[in-house]
Amino acid sequence: MRSVTTIAAVREQVAQWHAVGERVVFVPTMGNLHAGHVSLIEAARAHGKRFVASIFVNPMQFGPNEDFAHYPRTPTLDAQMLERAGCDLMFMPDVGEIYPNGAAQATRVEVPGISDILCGEFRPGHFEGVATIVAKLFHIVDPDVAIFGEKDFQQLTVIRRMVADLCLRVEIVGAPTVREADGLAMSSRNQYLDAAQRKLAPAIYRQLQQAVAEYQSVFSSDPTQFGQAITTEGNGFATDTVVNTIPLYATNFSATMYDLKAADYVTGPPSAPNMPPPSKTLVLATGRVPLVMADPQQPLAQRRARFPMHWRR
């Protein structure tokens, strides 16, 4: 594996591969790699011959009170993992290489609509930073295919929309989420959890699985209670079913809100010919649902509750 730190070196190497007809697959990361990242390299094998990975902690996507300064950086271990995974080129630039005039003064890429909902509502500017760095990396690496984890589904959706809107030639492929044995999605930030938090964290995934199973069970047995078919032609959606209520329950979590949106809602209408239209089945409806406070010793039936959806576009 070759390791480079400059834009010029990446472009030179990739140009050589393209000159002999080799497809290039790109995996952008922020480093501190784990098995989930390695799975992206493994997924890349089905899409090309040469594999490029970047390691860059992007300051533009961190808010003023977030963990940019403390984000875990393990470049030596990252290089070893990438080499073992079969990566051909590792691009590890410094901030000055990517933002020669500083991140604050750099031109930015904004994907409206889907960047300021869900996670974006609580991290203003985050997805603008993500879209900007990914666009820059695409122009630097010039890949045929780029692989992103489905764990960060909103990020994946923002990038797909950006690629379609800017008519970029790269194909975006989503790779399945890799989880720990207890169901917790692998993440570099999991190391921030203390022992008690780490023990509790997998319950979120279990609760969501239970909510989906319960929704599917109720819907299949009596779909009439989940609303009526609608069409919202104004924003390009053709939705078959609206969910009026959905159960959510949890154990020992502080009061919070789950913002539930269908994949169709997040993806939005196609904005370019090469962007596939969203599916027409609404899996989870738009709306905010309180997460129920509960005593873990209470019977399950007492910890369940249903809440009306508050619709918004």
Image (tube, rainbow, N blue to C red):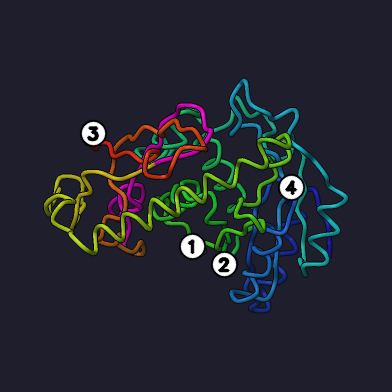
| 305 displayed left or right of 163 | left
Residue for point 53% across, 33% down: 252
The first of marks 4 and 1 along the sequence is: 4
Residue for point 28% across, 46% down: 285
Q: Pointer 2 and pointer 1: residues touching (CB < 8 Å)?
A: yes
Kind of residue sitting beneath label 3: His
The first of marks 2 and 4 along the sequence is: 4
Badge count: 4
The first of marks 3 and 2 along the sequence is: 2
Kind of residue sitting beneath label 4: Gly
Q: Secondary structure at mark 1?
A: loop
Q: Pointer 4 and pointer 1: residues touching (CB < 8 Å)?
A: no
The stretch drawn in magenta includes residue 220: no
Identify the residue position indicated by label 2 in the image: 144
Q: Judge by depth and name the residue closer to the eye, 37 or 189.
A: 189
Q: Position of residue 6 (x, y in %)?
A: 77, 48
From what the image shows, is residue 143 above or below residue 66?
below
Magenta region: 249-273
Tag in front: 1 or 3: 3
Q: Secondary structure at mark 4?
A: loop
Kind of residue sitting beneath label 1: Arg
Identify the residue position indicated by label 4 in the image: 31
